[in-house]
Image (cartoon, grey):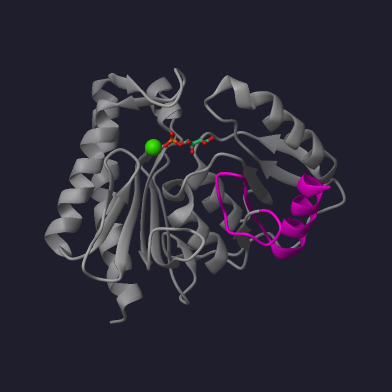
Amino acid sequence: MSLETDVLALAVEIAREAGELAHRRRSEGVAIAATKSAVADIVTEADREVEALIRDRLAAARPGDGFLGEESGAAGGTTDVTWVVDPIDGTVNYAYGLPTYAVSVAAVAGDPDPGTWTALAGAVFAPGLGELFTAARGEGARLGGRRLAVASEVGAAGALVATGFGYDPATHAGDLERLARVMPLARDIRRIGAASVDLCYVAAGRLDAYFERGINPWDHAAGGLIVQEAGGLIGGLSGGPPSREMTIAAPPALFEAIERALTA
Ligand code: IPD
Ligand code: CA
């Protein structure tokens, strides 16, 4: 088995176990543990518990690998592999009882920096939807057993485009201004509330495109590879990598059109 296949199998096993734990905790009720960057940026007890479970399972299976998680931060390793993890992406959905949240687990080679890493494998498991999206580098993207492909063309009505808004109210005017620039390309907009799921939906052709400012590496590490392996592009502005400045995911022609609209 290749390294990619090995780490994908582990990502899937751990994302499933972690997702089932998150789902069980959700049915027992959600406790907000703290707020983070802004009052709207919450962390639940489950976010922390689920990340601890993922970290423990990875340390047991591949003790030399590095780790970068949203809740517990970064730890270097002795191999070239780092795991980039969001234990619950879509925490606000989770806290409100909306089903669209996901565990996102990716393995990357190199430093956990989207500008330089090579994503090896990713699993996004959405237990409230009962869907598991996966990809290994060079081996395609899948929903369950089905191969995924990004939308082949945008109809005359325009693209179905997802986006998101930062937790800090000070960023909302800018986010709305960027949305207004993209709107002429769109037939309609979706705000799904979990970046990893937005990306998987682009890979599945359920959305034509996704763009958002303020996204972190753990939000897009797995979903970005799933988009690429489904024939799409993920990146930032002016040929740069996906970053907090901007992350765009779409089939190639639409990617360029959105990038142009945002930089015009
Ligand atoms: C958030 C979600 C949301 C996006 C935010 C992310 P979290 O992740 O992906 O859709 O708009 O930018 O921070 O906080 O739920 O893990
Ligand atoms: Ca999260």
Total number of numbered labels? Answer: 0
| Residue 258 among those drawn in magenta | yes
Q: Is residue 28 magenta?
A: no
Most extreme residue toward the bottom is 1
> Please, which residue is most extreme toward the left here?
60
Q: Is residue 55 above or below residue 96?
A: below
In the image: residue 119, left or right of residue 77? right
Residue 8, x across and y down, in percent: 33, 66
Q: Nearer the viewer, residue 39 or 208?
A: 39
90 left or right of 58 in image? right
Q: Quadrant of residue 204?
A: bottom right
Quadrant for the N terminus in the image: bottom left
Residue 204 appears in view: no
Q: Is any atom of residue 86 visible in this view?
A: yes
The foreground one among 118 and 89 is 118
Q: Is residue 161 left or right of residue 99?
A: right
Picture residue at 46% right of the left edge, 75% below the top: 139
- Report x, y in % for residue 99: 43, 32
Where is residue 78? Give x, y as percent. 21, 68
Quadrant in the picture for residue 28 = top left
Residue at left offset 55%, top offset 60%: 227
The residue lying at 45 percent from left, 73 percent from top is 137
- State the residue at coordinates (40%, 30%): 91
Above or below: residue 144 compared with residue 179: below
Measured as percent of width and height from the top left, residue 100 is found at 46, 36
User: Magenta residues?
Assistant: 237-264
The vertical placement of 124 against 251, above or below, is above
